[in-house]
Amino acid sequence: MKKYLTAAVCTLLSLILFCSCTAHRAKNAGYTVYRSSPVGVEIEYPDFWEMAENKNDKTVAFAAPSEGYSDTYRDNVSICSYELNKDDDMAFDNFVTQYIDKLPSTISGYNLVSEGNYPVGDYPDSYRIVYEGDTGDGQLRLQQTFIKSGNYVYIYSFIAEPKSYDYFNANSEIMLTTFKALMK
């Protein structure tokens, strides 16, 4: 009897430990938690989107499902992280300015729609730009949010065809509310 009681206690402890060590549960129904130390981010994404990561480039991408045969571009969210110069108090502002200044020469037909401060959760030092242009994949609308966390900047990019931008942007905004920087 004592043997069975010991086995039952061990099984119960194993279940408790296993359940507490598994992936974090998503706060949003129909979403999955993505967490990666190399990329340095935790975020929820829709269950029906595909995820791909490149740990070497510290990048992760989430692609919406194809909208059918006529869909020429899969709308997506990507996140990449860069380390800032910790000795430069203006490193974040300089990074964002230099990034934005390069866009007209890299995006054909570049058209800035909006830009400005855009606090994200616990990250008040955030900046968002929305622009349109042809990236080589056709005419797209791009929304990029630059998020500062310690000595790092994260670029959260939502890219979509203009006709489906509003539809998939709802998912993108939910994802952004769950963003957590793991690097500080």
Image (tube, rainbow, N blue to C red):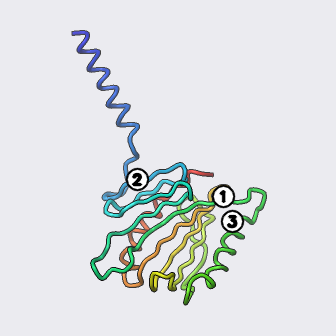
Residue hosting label 3? 92
Q: Earlier in the sequence, mark 2 or mark 3?
A: 2
Q: Under tag 2, what secondary structure?
A: strand
The location of residue 19, given as percent across then percent down, is: 35, 37
Residue hosting label 2? 33
The location of residue 107, given as percent across then percent down, is: 56, 83
Find the residue positioned furthest to the top: 2
**Residue 101, label in figure:** none
Q: Write down the quadrant of residue 73 in the picture.
A: bottom left
Q: Earlier in the sequence, mark 1 or mark 3?
A: 1
Compared with 88, 164 (above or below) is below
Q: Is 62 on the left-hand or right-hand side of 142?
A: left
Q: Disc 1, disc 3: CB below 8 Å?
A: no
Compared with 170, 134 (above or below) is below
Q: Which of marks 1 and 3 is in front?
A: 1
Of residues 62 and 16, the one nearer the viewer is 62
Q: Under tag 1, what secondary structure?
A: strand
Residue 111 in sight from this viewpoint: no
- Label 3 Cα crowd, 10 Å radius (few <14 / some 14-19 / many 20+): many
